[in-house]
Each structure stands twice: as structure tokens, then as C-alpha cells.
Amino acid sequence: MVCLGTGGYLQERVQRVTRGNKQALGLGPEEFKACLISLGYDVENDWQGDAEFNRIMSLVDPSHSGLVIFEAFIDFMSRETTDTDTADQVITSFKVLAGDKNFITAKELWRELPPDQAEYCIAHMAPYQGPDAVPGALDYKSFSTALYGESNL
């Protein structure tokens, strides 16, 4: 079974939904497990795999209906993929916010981020010490690597 590939499996189920059968996209536990395995999840038939599968099932089927509907699956995958940012991705994002500079200023953080996030960043970023530093420059690179456990704040 191809879970989200270009194969006909998903396309056929989506077509059923567009014809009014909302439950057509539901996956039974074994179908869902096969889908997860095809996406690289370690949910094989051993005690660790079973524990991981049960954890995931509790997220996508909290009512224990035995059916994982398409929307629950998409919500799960969205949460899983949004939690996989790397330090390099965060550094790249800060670099964009900083106008391609090696540092960012508090003024830029206040302008670009929600107030609570700007305040957190300003409180936790070390002063930038590079040769191109300006007064108040903040080091977003060390901050980003510290967020992902690659260094200490």
C-alpha cells in the first residue's frame, strides 16, 4: 500500500470523499500501521514498535473507534513535520529576518516576531561579537544551536 504517494490508493479514497462518503478515507489499524511503516516510522511488530504505534493511535483515534480518518492523519503528519526544524533552518530564518546579516537587533526582533517571542529571544540571545557587530547586535546563531542542544545558552 502506498500511503501518500502518487499511487491510486489515496486518490481513490479522496474521490470517494468528494462523492460524499466521508468515512471512505478512514484507515483501519493495520492499514494505518502499514502506512506509518511506509513513511519510515518504527512500528514493527515488537514491544517497542507496538508501544510507539499505540502512542500514535491514541493521538489519531482518541475515541478508540478503530478508524483513523484522513483529517486526523493529516493533522498528525502536520504536527510531526513541523516539529522537525533543525538549528540550520532556524539560523536561516533569523538570517532572513536580519536582512542577511550575521546578527539581529532587538528592533528587528520586535518588528518581525510576536511580542512574547521577541522578548524571549532578546532575553536569551548573547551579544554578537563578530567584526561586523553594531551596538545592540544579538547572536542568533549561538541561540539557534542552543535551542537544539548543539551548544549551551
Image (cartoon, rainbow, N blue to C red):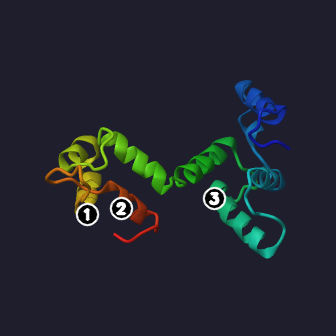
Decide which of tag 2 and tag 1 comes sooner along the chain.
1
- Rounded to the nearest angstrom, the CA distance separating label 1 from label 3 is 43 Å
Q: What residue type is labelled 3?
A: Pro
Residue 99: image quadrant is top left
Viewer-side label of 1, 3:
1
Decide which of tag 1 and tag 3 comes sooner along the chain.
3
Decide which of tag 3 and tag 2 comes sooner along the chain.
3
* Residue tagged 1: 126
Residue 7: image quadrant is top right
Q: In which quarter of the image is the C terminus?
A: bottom left
- Rounded to the nearest angstrom, the CA distance separating label 2 from label 1 is 8 Å
Viewer-side label of 3, 2:
2
The residue at 46%/68% (across/down) is 149
Q: Are marks 2 and 1 in contact (CB under 8 Å)?
A: yes
Drawn side of residue 121 relative to residue 12, left or right = left
Q: Is mark 1 on a helix, strand or loop?
A: loop
* Residue tagged 2: 142
Q: Are marks 1 and 3 in contact (CB under 8 Å)?
A: no
Residue 131, image x, y percentages = 24, 53
Q: What element carries label 2?
A: helix
* Residue tagged 3: 62
Q: Is mark 3 on a helix, strand or loop?
A: loop
Q: Quadrant of the N terminus?
A: top right
Residue 21: image quadrant is top right
Give the residue furthest to the bottom. Answer: 47
